[in-house]
């Protein structure tokens, strides 16, 4: 056999046995990872389209947020506060959203999962009759719980 033909065969067999990844990520393309990533993309689309009802439908009643201040419980909130304050504020005061997510990692442990990503957003808001744009770039982790076969957000909004 010619060396070029051997190299082509090794390349074909080597790529056939390699790990498949979710497009544009380093996350292995498994059934569970794909389910979580699809939920993250649903979340992104709901935020961009300002669909507060869709966002709320993706959230578990077990939702809990400590606002990244574990030593101060005064800013913690659960599902009811999320629905009545955060989602309501989003619906009433955010006029336009541009939201880009760059996936970093998905971890699944039984009926719990985390999706880590970097995000870039810019949103147009109105506050006190004045509107403006606010950009931000940061990292986030959405936390999920599987309830009745569906991955729902339980933290990280």
Image (cartoon, rainbow, N blue to C red):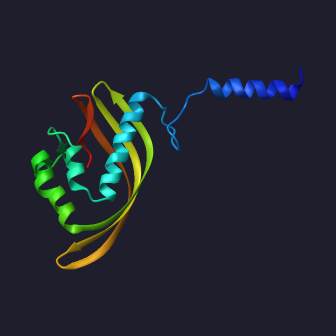
Residue 104 locus on image (x, y percent):
45, 43
Indicate the position of residue 2 as horizontal and vertical percent values.
89, 24
Name, please, the residue furthest toward the bottom: 130
Q: Quadrant of residue 59?
A: top left
Q: What number of labels is visible?
A: 0
Specify whether 86 is left or right of 136: left
Residue 85 location, x and y as percent?
Answer: 13, 57
Q: Is residue 45 above or below residue 92?
A: above
Q: Using the image, determine if residue 5 lies above or below residue 116.
A: above
Q: Residue at x 38, y 40 (%)?
A: 38
Q: Could one spot residue 67 in this view of the protein?
A: no
21 lies left or right of 101: right
The residue under the point 10% across, 55% down is 84
Q: Position of residue 146 (x, y in %)?
A: 25, 31
Quarter of the figure with residue 34: top left
Question: Which residue corresponds to the image point at 38% horizontal and 43% vertical from the top-left?
Answer: 116
Q: Which residue is found at the position 33% from the left and 58% from the top? A: 48
Quarter of the picture holding the N terminus: top right
User: Residue furthest toward the top?
Assistant: 1
Instruction: Please say whether residue 26 is visible from this viewpoint.
Output: yes
Q: Where is residue 62, by image quadrant? A: top left
């Amino acid at each position: 056999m010619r060396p070029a033909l051997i190299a082509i065969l090794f390349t074909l067999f080597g790529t056939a046995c390699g790990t498949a990844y979710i497009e544009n990520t380093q996350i292995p393309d498994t059934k569970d990872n794909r389910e979580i990533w699809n939920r993250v993309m649903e979340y992104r689309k709901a935020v961009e389209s300002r669909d507060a009802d869709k966002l709320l439908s993706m959230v578990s009643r077990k939702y809990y947020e400590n606002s990244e201040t574990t030593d101060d419980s005064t800013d913690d909130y659960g599902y009811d506060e999320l629905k009545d304050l955060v989602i309501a504020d989003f619906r009433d005061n955010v006029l336009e959203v541009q939201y880009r997510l760059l996936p970093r990692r998905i971890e699944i442990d039984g009926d719990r999962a985390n999706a880590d990503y970097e995000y870039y957003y810019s949103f147009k808001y109105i506050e006190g009759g004045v509107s403006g744009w606010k950009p931000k770039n940061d990292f986030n982790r959405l936390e999920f719980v599987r309830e009745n076969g569906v991955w729902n957000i339980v933290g990280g909004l």
